[in-house]
Amino acid sequence: MSDTRLDTLLIGIDSACDPVLEPLFEKGALPNLESIIDEGASGPLESQIPPWTASAWPSMYTGVNPGKHGVFGFLDYEGYDWDVVNATHVREAALWDLFTHHDMTSVVVNVPVTAPPPEIRGAIVPGYTAPEDPQCHPEGTLEELREALGEYRVYPDPDREQPGEYVDLIRMRGAAFRHLAEEHDPEFGFVEFQGTDSVFHEHPGREDYVEAIYRAVDQEIGDLLESCDPDTVVVASDHGMGPYEKYELRVNEFLDEEGYVQTATGGSGMPAWLPMLNSQLREGKEAETPSPGIAGRAVGAAAQVGITPARAGKALRAVGLEGLVKRIVPADARRAGNEQVDFAESTAYMRSRIELGLRMNVEDREPEGIVPESEYESVREELIDVLSGVETPDGDPMFETVGPREEYFWGPYADKGVDVVMVPDEFEQFLSADFKGEVFGPPTEPYNHKLHGMIAISGEGVDTDADLSGAHLFDVAPTICSLLGVERSDRMDGDVLSATEPTEEYEYPRLDGGTQETDDEEIEDRLSALGYLEGNE
């Protein structure tokens, strides 16, 4: 047993939800997690819109909606330009900022969107969207961990065998947290496991991989509880995970047909999400953007007269030869010929599918906006009406709801998000920003995010009979504050869950300082490989 003062430990399990956990509970594969649930209060945890990692984890650790913290997806936009988000794009205080204000110590390991880390009392080892060799706090922490543990990495090595590679990463997270907890003796700890999400994106249908990864997480949970002995433990996920078995709507293709989107070809549209074709950055070399070459220029020229790989693929599918284009035309050539959104000439468009919405090209807001401010509401209402009536080829509704962003985002950064929010029906319909020659098709990914994750709270002062059925992602931060006896921020959108005693609100200082560019193409490569950044292939 530990003699540390760890009061509250928050364990983040990306994508954990009842449909994923129940089969593993039935096998007896997760005894430590099952014990936390049995001995405490638990329930489903409703995520936010959009329920994706880069925006949802900041919402969890700040307790505010994206309109207040400013992160709506993996990308931050300035006009038509973009950058991968990092911690400086999160414009609201995180839990560890609040605790530092109260002279309390935190240890934070592998939490997404925490690089570059702020200076706090304690330690931060960043997770997802950080570089492979991230800046940590305090300076020298990464080197210290690698010396103590033998190895520490943020991302899996693609050349190593799965699922063993993910299991190794999971063990690194637990070992890193235990090492830093012993060194810094924190009141608050937060460790996140990401492989529980990535396995569904990278190896859909591999139930054996899922089980191996979750067993490893459960083992780490047991080791953390034994070595750190927290007074209270909270387990929470940012969203759920499940199959997508209905249709994919290519939103920009639909908007093109409806006259709202204009397209560009030959690689001139933005953005063109590409995975890097080599591992130069992982090897420490400067990135090189691949050239389209002769084949690419030829396809780009053909695209100028309406012959694109996507449209050629549509014709070939009719005769059973849909793989022909990919076999005979190099990937970079296909990208050069495919249609992309011409942002400046379009009325509205989907920037990224995970934003779950449309951005309008408004005058005096976008660099080359064409929608007059005086027509903003009427055009937006028209878009909402058009999209609300979209049905799948089977006659089912495509969307559960389509509405203005104010119903989902509020705060000083709400205008950075989409103007029209589109919530897929039961999160079984898939959305894509790509052009593929047809408006509808099968889902690009057979598994993806669902709206409900899970939460469990166990330990001292927890009402085990509490009903957590209405718990929301925004409730996690104020509840953590309550468990530590700290005033929650008056800017938080969530409430203290009924399993704990509420605390008073307090007006904390606001963050100052600007944002920093991520400028790391290896991160873009990683996001592309997981399907978060779409390519025009």
Image (cartoon, rainbow, N blue to C red):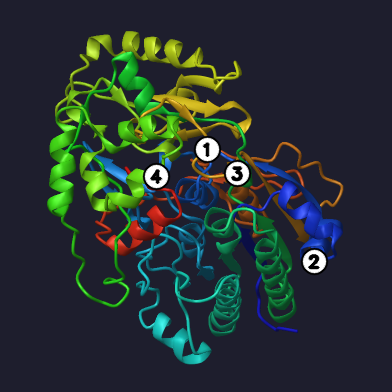
Residue at the front extreme of this rendering: 319
Please name the amino acid that badge 2 sits on. Answer: Ala
Q: Earlier in the sequence, mark 4 or mark 2?
A: 2
Mark 3 falls on what kind of element? helix
Ranked by sequence position, the earlier of labels 3 and 2 is: 2
Residue 29 is tagged as 2
Judge left or right: residue 517 versus residue 501.
left
Q: Tell me the mark number nearer the camera, choosing from 4 and 1.
A: 1
Q: Which mark is residue 473?
A: 3
**Considering only vertical position in the picture, is 130 above or below 227?**
above
Element type where label 2 sits in the image: loop
Point out the tag, 4 or 1, that comes first from the N-terminus: 4
* Coordinates of residue 518 in the picture (x, y in percent): 28, 58
The one nearer the camera, 157 or 204, is: 204
Say whether residue 210 is left or right of residue 442.
right
Binning the other alpha carbons within 10 Å of mark 3 as few (below 14), some (14 to 19) or many (20 upward) gives: many
Tell me the kind of residue under disc 4.
Val
Q: Which residue is mark 4?
A: 71
Nearest to the observer: residue 499 or residue 406? 406
Q: Name the spot of residue 425 as percent of width and height, x first.
A: 59, 26
| Mark 1 secondary-structure assignment | loop
| Image location (x, y in percent) of residue 167 | 61, 73
Q: Is residue 191 above or below residue 69?
A: below
Amino acid at the residue labelled 1: Pro
> Along the line of sight, which residue is nearer the eye, 281 or 149?
281
The residues bearing labels 1 and 2 have C-alpha atoms spaced at a distance of: 31 Å
Residue picked out by circle 1:
443
Structural distance between the alpha carbons of marks 3 and 1: 27 Å
